[in-house]
Image: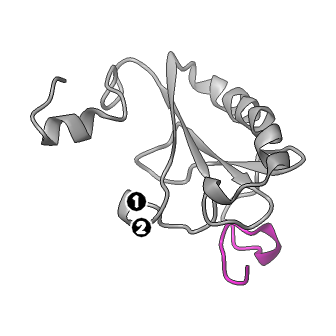
Amino acid sequence: MQACRFCLDNHLLSEPPVGRTGHFYVLMSNDPALTEAAMVIPHRHSLSPFDMEPAEWADLPNALNLARRQLERFAPHGFNIGWNVGALAGQHVFHTHLHVIARRPGTAMDGKGIRRAFKSLRGGRQ
């Protein structure tokens, strides 16, 4: 897809991928707020995981393990893994990508899952 910054053929990445599998590449986060994070991104352009093909789904565990290995340098105690699908859900780059965030004690929101923000807005248990 022309002008998509995650389509490798467009040469728009600010940093090179740190690894590749048959259907994915792994890119470390360049977001200053998420320095201990990576993204798993399919080589083939698609808008969301709902558009992924069976071969991509079959290769996803390999790509996730590659991302985990890259994040081991941060000595994580856990991970948050998630997709933002659509603008309303916070997707800013419209090329499928899975966020993998290393979590350690003493970092922002440690011990809190990804549902915490929604629960706190609705007055639910925290």
Q: Secondary structure at mark 2?
A: helix
Whether residue 113 is situated above or below residue 88 in the rendered picture: above
Mark 2 burial class by Cα count in 10 Å: few <14, some 14-19, many 20+? few
Confirm whether the magenta stretch covers residue 72: no
Tell whether 121 sits left or right of 89. left
Q: Which residue is mark 1?
A: 90
Question: Magenta region: which residues?
Answer: 1-13
Residue 50, x across and y down, in percent: 62, 55
Q: Which residue is mark 2?
A: 87
Closer-to-camera residue (37/113):
113
Task: Tell me the residue at 24%/41% (across/down).
Answer: 118
Task: Tell me the residue at 51%/41% (across/down).
Answer: 82
Q: Quadrant of residue 88?
A: bottom left
Closer-to-camera residue (113/51):
51
Q: Contact (CB < 8 A) between labels 2 and 1?
A: yes
Closer-to-camera residue (9/47):
47
Residue 53, x across and y down, in percent: 78, 54
Q: Secondary structure at mark 1?
A: loop
Whether residue 114 is situated above or below residue 6 in the rendered picture: above
Disc sitting over residue 48 in the figure: none
Whether residue 79 is situated above or below residue 83 in the rendered picture: above
Query: For the residue marked with disc 1, what is the amino acid?
Result: Gly
Confirm whether the magenta stretch covers residue 5: yes
Where's the C terminus, which quadrant? top left
Query: For the residue marked with disc 2, what is the amino acid?
Result: Ala
Q: Main secondary structure of the magenta part?
A: loop
**Residue located farthest toward the bottom when viewing the structure as drawn:** 2
Task: Tell me the residue at 30%/29% (across/down).
Answer: 109
Residue 112, x across and y down, in percent: 31, 25
In space, the residues marked 2 and 1 are separated at their CA atoms by: 5 Å
Tell whether 24 sits left or right of 114. right
